[in-house]
Image (cartoon, rainbow, N blue to C red):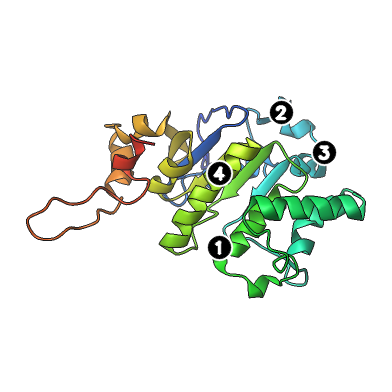
Amino acid sequence: MRPGGLRVLDRFSLTVESGDVLALVGRSGSGKTTVLKLVNRLLLPDAGAVLVEGRDTREWEPIRLRRRVGFVLQDVGLFPHLNVAGNVGVVPRLEGWPPERTTARVDELLDLVGLGAPSVAGRWPDELSGGQRQRVGVARALAIDPPVLLMDEPFGALDPLTRAELHTEFRRIQQRVRKSVVIVTHDMGEAFALGDRVGVLEGGRLIALDRPEVVAASREPLVRRLLDALPVVPRGPGTDAAPRAEGGAGAAASR
């Protein structure tokens, strides 16, 4: 609860199964990022419990919990004084891995995220494109193979083409690593593109939670407002409008 008694999340309950991707979508202030902060114990619930690997987050030592939960941020947050290899290898070094094991893991992860060229590992963050920085952020989050991955608007700052490319890359990587993923986004199309299930948050309440095609067909007014906000690509005179942009309601049914 916020000071003054306002509930940030109200009667909120869900489970993310091993290997599944849950995409949470909603307007700003709906409680999406609060969910992520509860999972990695940046916040503790005033009531109820948050379980990670079957254990209440209050029982976890905070640093040990966060090493079990990878986190990908919208602004990536790469350390500017470290090159790509240094950024990806931060947590293994903190864990006391031998240098040769860290180097092998960095090489493996850069290859996984499509940055396997030898020249990339030595680049500095300001020498990378936005898409490359985001790939490095994903590699860093996976560095010590955590079972849980949290993603907070990870692709929101990218141009549409790069974002679509990274959606494809994310699905490819998830097929390899099979993490339990919670991704939050403002974009219903992105939620459909990435989630095995989609949850819709409004005012701290979970008003929908189901497979993308089921949510796309919802008649719940608050869900429809998000669906109706998806852009439609216009066509020339005398033709119908094209299907909504990638990941939109039309695309969800064929996902």
Depth check, mark 2 against mark 3: the one in front is 2
Question: Few, some or many C-alpha atoms within 10 Å of disc 2 (few <14, some 14-19, many ≥20)?
Answer: few
Q: Which residue is labeled 2 in the image? A: 53
Point 57% across, 50% down: residue: 152
Which secondary structure, mark 2?
A: loop
Q: Residue 172, which numbered label?
A: 4
Q: Which residue is labeled 1 in the image? A: 131
Q: CA distance from mark 1 to mark 4?
A: 16 Å
Specify whether 22 is left or right of 247: right
Q: Mark 3: which amino acid? A: Glu
The residue lying furthest to the top in this view is 54
CB-based contact (under 8 Å), mark 1 and mark 4? no
Q: Is residue 141 visible?
A: yes
The residue lying furthest to the left in this view is 238
CB-based contact (under 8 Å), mark 3 and mark 4? no
> Where is residue 65, by image quadrant?
top right
Q: Is residue 42 visible?
A: no
Question: Few, some or many C-alpha atoms within 10 Å of disc 4 (few <14, some 14-19, many ≥20)?
Answer: few
Q: Mark 1: which amino acid? A: Gly
Q: Which residue is labeled 3 in the image? A: 61
